[in-house]
Image (spheres, grey):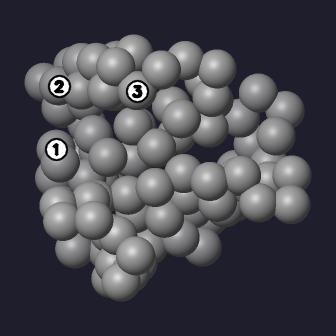
Amino acid sequence: MVKFVLRGVGGSLIRSRGLKDWGEGQRGECQRKKGEWVIRVRKDLEGEEELEVLLHEFMHAAYWDHDEEFVEEVAADLAKLLWRLGYRKG
């Protein structure tokens, strides 16, 4: 588990094998529980896909007041840019 703070609100990132309540193809989720963010991301993600999903879910926590289209577009664009710049999991 990784703790984080975005826009003054704390949260936790949890890597998961997936849960029964996740829909087909769902790679992550972001929920507010007891005043903190809980982000769950599939454990089997790798590479640029993992980067995009992490950015996407962190964007939901940071920009909860924006719609899904905004989050999807910005997270995908940032993931592509960071990947091209050489970002790799260390």
Q: Position of residue 1 (x, y in %)?
A: 60, 73
**Residue drawn at 62 percent across, 53 percent down:** 31
Can residue 71 be seen here? The reply is no
Question: Which label number is shown at residue 80?
Answer: 2
Q: Position of residue 82 (x, y in %)?
A: 26, 26
Q: Position of residue 14 (x, y in %)?
A: 53, 70
- Identify the mark nearer the N-term, 1 or 2: 1
Q: Position of residue 68 (x, y in %)?
A: 40, 26
Query: In 3D space, how far apart are the residues under numbered discs 3 and 1 (Cα atoms)?
Result: 20 Å
65 shown above or below 4 = above
Q: Evaluate if marks 1 and 2 touch, with contact meaning CB atoms under 8 Å apart.
A: yes
- Identify the mark nearer the N-term, 2 or 3: 3
Type of the residue with mark 1: Glu
Is residue 61 toward the left or the right of residue 21 in the image?
A: right
Question: Which label number is shown at residue 22?
Answer: none
Q: Residues within 10 Å of mark 1 (few under 14, many from 20)?
A: some
Query: In 3D space, how far apart are the residues under numbered discs 1 and 2 (Cα atoms)?
Result: 7 Å
33 shown above or below 44 = above
Type of the residue with mark 2: Lys
Place residue 12 in its image quadrant.
Answer: bottom right
| Residue on which the image places disc 3 | 68
2 shown above or below 73 = below
Type of the residue with mark 3: Glu
Q: Residues within 10 Å of mark 3 (few under 14, many from 20)?
A: few
Secondary structure, mark 1, is helix
- Identify the mark nearer the N-term, 3 or 1: 1
**Residue drawn at 64 percent across, 60 percent down:** 38
| Residue on which the image places disc 1 | 48
Is residue 14 toward the left or the right of residue 46 in the image?
A: right
**Residue drawn at 28 percent across, 18 percent down:** 73
Q: Nearer the viewer, residue 89 or 31?
A: 31
